[in-house]
Amino acid sequence: MTYSYDDIKIQGAMEILNDSGFDGLSQALGIFLNEAMKIERSQHLKASPYERTDTRNGYANGFKDKTLKTRIGELSLQIPQVRESDFYPSSLEKGIRSERALRTALAEMYINGISTRKVEKVTKEMCGLSVTSMEVSRATQRLDEEMKIWRTRKLSCCRYVYFDARYEKIHDGGVIRDVAVLSAIGINDNGLKELLGVSVAFSEAEVHWREFFSSLVERGLHGVELIISDAHEGLKAARKKVFASVKWQRCQFHLQQNAQAYVPKISLRKSVARDIRSVFNAPDLNEANRLLSIVVDKYNDSAPKLSRWMEGNLPEGLTAFAFPEEHWKKIRTSNCMERINREIKRRTRVVSIFPNEASCLRLVSAVLMEINQDWEGARKFMDMNMENNIN
């Protein structure tokens, strides 16, 4: 059985876009979304409209009108109903959690009287002309329950885990403070990426990292063989207490950046970067160590501080050699966290300054939850059926 869009309606949506351009985007999107929801209902029922089949899983029961406010305008939707069945189209639910969380954060600011003119304008566009504290309270309760379920779900075996931190600003007792947003990506037994969790607190100190690590373990995370991250001091200290036996790969990209702070002359920067790359791109650990020794000696006289820094820090970027060569490219840096941080920044910059910690955690959780759903069923990030090269 195949399903197709209503060609007449889709053609109408395209005509709207052709005639009105971006001004007609919300109307066109509403048409597309309505058709997608009807297709999803047919798939749920295992039958097309008016089709007679023994495999039918229920019956359609009309539509319920709904207006959804988004950043591109109001969407006039018709939610398909199903008789005697719990059905709600995922095509509508998917992708609007972070939109709801964003609207709620802006509304909180508006209600608390801490919004700027820009925020107030966006709030009116996204939340309507009037926002009551009761509406905000109901929205936050629903979102918090949904996000908590995702953040506390059970975890499983992940051989590799990437960690990173970024900062957001919040209002706290009449002052603006930075909060650290910690997040983690795991590579499970099937070679798929999974966003394991997120935590928001006032510092990136050891206690925050330790609590975050411990929460992942308590939720069932196990089998971790390698942690990939930058050299956050709090992370390093917490890792030794919670993941004492787990190897650590310091991000090679960040090591390259860190090294430049020890280069005494601008003229040396390119050669230093080239020499460090030669170490990281070595064919095996023995050759990497040999090249590292040469590079350390090379700068011993011309840049002694750089030389000492290389000797003490670059070996932390060579742990990946202990794992399958096919994995080296993806486990030697924490670059897979970059898209995550970019997407978080894209959403949070609209708010700029959150009204509280909970508001920040709510929006970031929604963003990560949506990304994690996109990864479900995606192709493998890496093949896990490999043996380690060395111990």
Image (cartoon, rainbow, N blue to C red):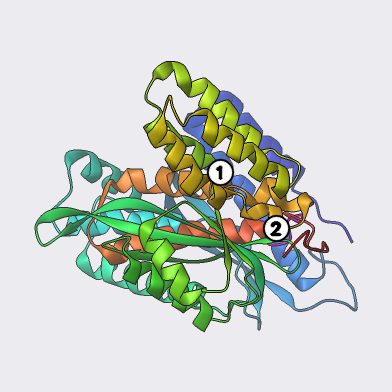
Gap between marks 2 and 1 measured at Cα: 15 Å
Location of mark 2 (residue): 322
Query: Relative to 158, is 213 on the left or the right?
Result: left
Q: Which amino acid does label 1 sit on?
A: Gln
Q: Residue 289, image x and y in percent?
A: 64, 45
| Res. 78 visible in picture | no
Q: Which amino acid does label 2 sit on?
A: Ala
Q: Nearer the viewer, residue 272 or 234?
A: 272
Location of mark 1 (residue): 252
Q: Within 10 angstroms of label 2, few (less than 14), some, or many (20 or more) residues?
A: some
Residue positioned 63% across, 74% down in the render: 87
Q: Residue 13, image x and y in percent?
A: 63, 37
Above or below 268: residue 123:
below
Q: Which residue lies furthest to the left in this view?
A: 174
Query: Relative to 287, is 224 on the left or the right?
Result: left
Which span is picked out in magenta?
Answer: 376-380
Above or below 323: residue 268:
above
* Mark 2 vs mark 1: in front: 2
